[in-house]
Image (cartoon, helix red, strand yellow):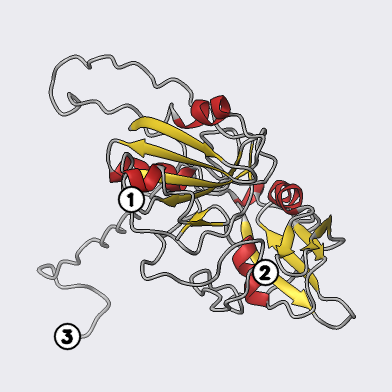
């Protein structure tokens, strides 16, 4: 029967309660050591250096290979429109560009023409399209001599070199890794932590300069130190290397116009660590820029290494 009433046995269900919204998930905490956008360099901060004194036949890859080891380096470019090529190099921060300016000033770029570099801060930053000319693994295959180095390749490739993060420094100068925290062998057991003495600070070099080290020997426990001046002080070298882990002994050999040094370590790993961290370190008494560290052709102590080592060298590099 039609009507506005509802049958007494017909019950209506109450309206379903709304599903509560899930609680908001808090954003993840910031990762320690990650770069903050607030501290990135502003667009008005000049991070580019202007390079003159390049030879007329310079290649862009040659300049890139010289700059790629400097802390904070991002990209480089050469302008060939004028009578003389002009180079530009972009760095991550302004202090990286200033440090590169000091390290490269008056550096002899071409050993044949004796052309020296002149570095100034650019008026504006270099603009580089990402992915163009920024391959850090590409190596210049030119056989020309630049900065007194040797671009010819030996049978053994040099050990890989990875520039450490510029924000962390063991020496107080950008470009060196910080020492790892002391190892705690009892960390996984419910016992009191064994106190361990903190490592004493290691005295580092006063500066760092780029060096060409394309020709090297197979890794061993003995290092050959080249590009040392005649006035280098042995105590200064010993003070730098004797505090390195695994150091055993050191021998300095002097001739009329050439000074080299051999340093023995406990094993290949400790020698390789120093080969990496002190490459290009500047000794104030040397007067020749950064040290060139290579693996010796023979382990320390062999007569050929100490007596005949000077005969088997070319411009201070083992052959």
From the image, tell me which residue sits under label 2: 63
Quadrant location of the C terminus in the rendered image: bottom left
Q: Residue furthest left?
A: 9
Considering the numbered disc 3 on the image, is that residue within a helix, a strand or a loop?
loop
Q: CA distance from mark 3 to mark 2?
A: 99 Å
Question: Where is residue 304 shown, x and y percent of the image?
Answer: 35, 48
Question: Where is residue 310 shown, x and y percent of the image?
Answer: 49, 49
Residue 72 in sight in this render: yes
- Number of other residues with Cα within 10 Å of mark 3, as a class: few under 14, some 14 to 19, many 20 or more: few
Q: Residue at x 72, y 77 (%)?
A: 58
Quadrant location of the N terminus in the rendered image: bottom left
From the image, tell me which residue sits under label 1: 298
Question: Where is residue 269 shown, x and y percent of the image?
Answer: 30, 44
Q: CA distance from mark 1 to mark 2?
A: 33 Å
Residue 132 appears left or right of 242: right
Which callout, 1 or 2, points to the residue nearer the camera? 1
The part of the image, by quadrant, that contains residue 42 is: bottom right
Q: CA distance from mark 3 to mark 1?
A: 113 Å
Kindly identify which numbered label has been placed on residue 1.
3
Q: Residue at x 53, y 31 (%)?
A: 237
- Number of other residues with Cα within 10 Å of mark 2, as a class: few under 14, some 14 to 19, many 20 or more: many
């Amino acid at each position: 029967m039609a009507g506005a009433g509802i049958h007494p046995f017909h019950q209506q269900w109450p309206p379903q309660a709304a599903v509560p919204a899930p609680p908001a998930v808090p954003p993840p905490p910031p990762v320690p050591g990650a770069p903050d956008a607030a501290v990135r360099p502003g667009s008005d901060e000049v991070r580019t250096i202007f390079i003159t004194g390049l030879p007329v036949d310079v290649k862009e890859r040659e300049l890139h290979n010289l700059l790629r080891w400097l802390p904070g380096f991002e990209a480089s470019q050469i302008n060939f429109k004028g009578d003389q090529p002009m180079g530009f190099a972009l760095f991550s921060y302004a202090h990286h560009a200033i440090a590169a300016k000091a390290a490269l000033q008056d550096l002899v770029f071409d050993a044949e023409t004796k052309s020296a570099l002149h570095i100034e801060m650019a008026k504006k930053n270099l603009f580089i399209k990402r992915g163009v000319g920024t391959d850090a693994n590409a190596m210049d295959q030119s056989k020309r001599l630049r900065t007194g180095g040797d671009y010819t390749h030996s049978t053994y490739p040099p050990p890989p070199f990875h520039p450490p993060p510029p924000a962390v420094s063991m020496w107080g100068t950008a470009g060196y890794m910080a020492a790892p925290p002391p190892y705690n062998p009892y960390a996984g057991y419910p016992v009191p932590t064994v106190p361990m003495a903190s490592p004493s600070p290691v005295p580092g070099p006063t500066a760092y300069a780029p060096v060409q080290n394309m020709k090297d020997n197979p890794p061993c426990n003995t290092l050959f130190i080249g590009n040392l001046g005649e006035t280098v002080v042995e105590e200064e070298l010993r003070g730098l290397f004797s505090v390195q882990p695994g150091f055993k002994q050191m021998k300095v050999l002097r001739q009329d116009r050439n000074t080299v040094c051999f340093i023995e370590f406990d094993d290949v790993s400790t020698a390789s660590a120093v080969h990496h961290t002190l490459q290009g370190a500047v000794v104030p008494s040397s007067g020749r820029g950064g040290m060139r560290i290579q693996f010796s052709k023979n382990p320390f102590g062999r007569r050929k290494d100490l007596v005949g080592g000077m005969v088997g060298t070319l411009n201070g590099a083992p052959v």
